Amino acid sequence: MEVIKIESTPKTPAVNFDPNEGIIEIRGRSIPENSIEFYRPLIEWIEKYAENPKPETIVNVQFEYFNTSSSKCILDIFKRIENIHNAGHKVIVNWYYEEDDEDMLEAGEDYQSIIKVPFKMIEVPA
């Protein structure tokens, strides 16, 4: 499998998906013109990775902001990650949020309540 590395833009997050290390990272702002178009290849990559994942997969998520259409795509990503977990593989989601960003903490808690995968809420300095 290929590594996916996408630099961030003012409207899209940085992405680093490394199947060799079992790392899935998304950081930044997510307000793309077309969320489905941006996230579709990432969801497809996770589906392929799920066929032969590492014994442990680390998911690092640190959004500054995401819009409503991105939130649905992010949930789709988490559902694919939940499938890896349900297949008996260790998965840890690290949800980073800035110390004064209650909305982003709540968003992480919302995903945690929907997806049955261990989440770690990690506060970082603003």
Image (cartoon, helix red, strand yellow):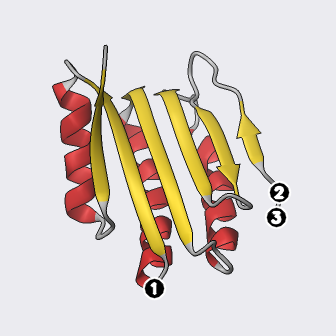
Q: Where is residue 42 in the image (x, y as percent from the top left)?
A: 64, 53
Direction from residue 95 to residue 58 in the image, left or right: right
For the residues labelled 1 and 2, the Cα–Cα distance comes to 23 Å
Of 126 and 103, nearer the camera is 126
Dot 3 falls on a residue whose secondary structure is loop
Contact between marks 3 and 2 (CB within 8 A): the answer is yes
Of 90 and 7, nearer the camera is 90
Residue at image mark 1: 88
Residue at image mark 2: 2
For the residues labelled 1 and 3, the Cα–Cα distance comes to 21 Å
User: Quick one: quadrant of the N terminus?
Assistant: bottom right
Q: Quadrant of residue 65?
A: top left
Residue at image mark 3: 1
Type of amino acid under label 2: Glu
Task: Name which residue lies at 29% across and 50% down.
Answer: 120
Type of amino acid under label 1: Gly
